[in-house]
Image (tube, grey):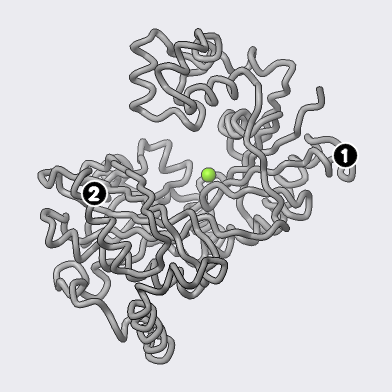
Amino acid sequence: MKHRIILHCDVNNFFASVECALNPSLKDLPLAVTGEKSKRNGIVLAKNNLAKMCGVQTGDVIFKAKQKCPDLVCVRPHHDMYEKYSKKIRKIYEEYTDRVEPFGIDECWLDVTDTVKFFGTPLDIANTLRKRIKEEIGVTISVGISFSKIFAKLGSDMKKPDAVTLIPYSTFKKQTYHLPLNSVIGIGKRLEVKLNKMNIYTLGDLAGYDEKIIKKKFGVVGENLQKKLQGIGDDEIASAFDYRQVKSIGNGTTTIVDVKNMEEMKSVVMFLCDEIASRLRKKNLVGSTIHISLRTSELTWASKSHTIETLTNTAKDLFDESIKMIEKMWDKYTLIRSVRISVSNLQDETAINQLNFFDKKNNKKQLNKAIDKIREKYGYKSIQPLITKNEEFINSNALRLDDRD
Ligand SMILES: [Mg+2]
């Protein structure tokens, strides 16, 4: 059987590395990229190796990080630059295969099964990428090479920075089966706890467990995960030159003060939904699956997805559904620090039966059109839903768009 050849490339300390590439005088200092001190996101977002060696961790509040590392240099994030670097790096990957799948801003899977013959061996490609990105971009990457996405990603974690790890089919069990469950993606904390209760602690434990029991307890998700760990099957990596379907459109924000009641939550949610809806319309897309993540002040996440019956790109529809979901997932005692909403299951607006989609909602469509036109002419902020005028949250930069995809 012919195995695929998958590379997983991960930029080391991405945010901090870009900051050093932009300002080389920071290179030999312990560095942290942090949110604004006066605001609630005054935490360490990323750090370099020197800061890591002092014990600085992502998520530390600034003063705590400085206690651990008095010489720590803190810089504000430059998201536009991270975006730029990410694109430049992806361009280099795309010279070696058209099958490049990004995962987050600084990681990509590359399927080089069909193109490796043009560039030597898989190891040659990995080393070339490593060298080129160091020389041309000024940051380092770790590369994992394997026969599936899950093991390629595991490989890129094994040795870093600036390193290559090979996990071939012939030895993957020996190399990985002793590792703890959390060394692969797809096993979150809650699943890990459940598996531990069944005496499953390592990747090998899970791979070798009675398949029927795994399927019964964890459904298709558990079954697929177990298969992947056994080295069977994996997800395809789509061609970059296939029609580039946007998978989801989303938006997140961190508030200055914790959100503590539904009134406040509503203004945050409307702010996000309004922006998402506007972007959907710009791309002529409609969507039906809403995904919400809430982060509490203790930095833990709760998330939920729900598919609605209609396809929409109207802020009010997204808002109504989001609020219904949040009613179910938030106890309203826990303080919320950040909210993220995204919409997927996207389809081309024009591909939908115009009659049944717009008939009832014709007035909504007219309204959306008018809003979009005003914004085109006078800027995005020229017209805003009234509910987002909740001063405490929406004032100037109080609500900042953290990340968009
Ligand atoms: Mg990384």
Which secondary structure lies at badge 1?
loop
Q: Badge 1 local density, few (<14 within 10 Å), some, or many (20+)?
A: few
Q: Quadrant of residue 176?
A: top right
Q: How far across and down, in percent of the image, does residue 400 sit?
A: 31, 66
Which residue is located at x 55 percent, y 71 percent? 350
The residue drawn where x is 34% and y is 18% is 194
- Relative to 154, say whether 347 is above or below: below
The residue shown at (74%, 16%) is: 170
Q: Could you say which disc has been placed on residue 131 in the image?
A: none
From the viewer's perspective, is residue 4 above or below residue 31? above
Place of residue 298 in the rendered image (x, y in percent of width and height, measured from the top left): 22, 41
Nearer the observer, 271 or 54: 271
* Tag 2 secondary structure: helix
Which circle marks residue 120 in the picture?
1
- Could you tell whether 345 is left or right of 272 in the image? right
Residue matched to label 2: 63
Mark 1 against mark 2, which lies toward the viewer? 1
Identify the mark nearer the N-term, 1 or 2. Answer: 2
